[in-house]
Image (tube, grey):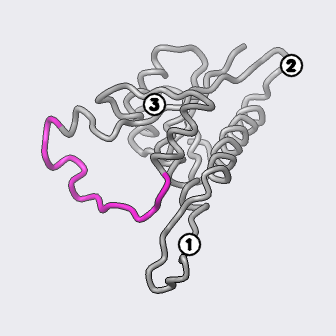
Amino acid sequence: MVYNLVIDADSLLYQCCYRHQFDFDFGYKENPIKMCKYELAYMDFVGAIYAMKSKIHGQFDLQKNDSIEFEIVFSPKHTFRHDRTSTYKANRKGTDIVGIPELKILVESRLGATEIPLMEADDIVITRAYQKENVIIACIDKDIFTHSPVYCFNYSKWEWI
C-alpha cells in the first residue's frame, strides 16, 4: 500500500529558518546583519520530513511492501483571498526571520514542491485528501484539523490530531 503524506510546508520553512538564524556583524556590533545558514535549514527541513515518515511507520504499522510518498505544498505570496478583501491577513506583522524565500527555492529545486497560483497550501492539502487514496496531512493549521476527513499530524506539537 502507498501512503500519501501531503505537507502544508509554509510553517515548516519558517521554523527551519528560525532555528538557523545568526547575526553577522561585519565589525559593526550595533548594526548586525541577520543571516540564515541555508544548508543547515535545508537539512533541518529534510530531517523533519523523514521524521514525519517515521511517525507514520509507527502509527500505521506499515508492512515491508508499504511505502510513503510525500508532496510538499507551498502557498504563493498572493492568493485569491487577497483579491476578495483588502483586510485578508492585514493584521499580520512582518517577520525579521531571513532566508525563507531562499530556503523555499532550495527545497523546490532539490525535492520538488507544489505551488498553485492564487491557492493557499491549506486548500491544496485538503483537496488532496479527497483526490488521493491513503492521504495523511502534516500541518499546523487548526482549520485543517477541524475539516480534514483524514489523519493529520501536527508537526509543531509533534502529535496526531
* Residue at x-position 54% and y-position 76%: 26
Foreground pick, 132 / 100: 100
* Residue at x-position 49% and y-position 37%: 8
Is 91 within the magenta?
Answer: yes
Helix, strand or loop status at disc 3: loop
Mark seen at residue 148: 3
Location of the N terminus (image quadrant): top right
Q: Which is more N-terminal, label 1 or label 2?
A: 1
Distance of mark 1 from mark 3, alpha carbons?
Answer: 43 Å
Q: Place residue 92 in its image quadrant.
A: bottom left
Task: Name the outermost residue toward the right.
Answer: 64
Circle 3: residue type: Ser
Is 101 within the magenta?
Answer: no
For label 3, count other residues whose C-alpha is less than 10 Å away and answer few (under 14), some (14-19) or many (20+): some
Q: Read off the residue under disc 2.
A: 64
Foreground pick, 23 / 49: 23
Distance of mark 3 from mark 2, alpha carbons?
Answer: 28 Å
Nearest to the eye among marks 1 and 3: give it.
Answer: 1
Q: Is residue 57 above or below residue 2?
A: below
CB under 8 Å between discs 1 and 3 = no
Mark seen at residue 24: 1
Q: Is residue 126 above or below residue 15?
A: above
Tell me residue 44's x, y (percent). 67, 50
Boundaries of the magenta span? 83-99
Tell me residue 118's x, y (percent). 29, 29
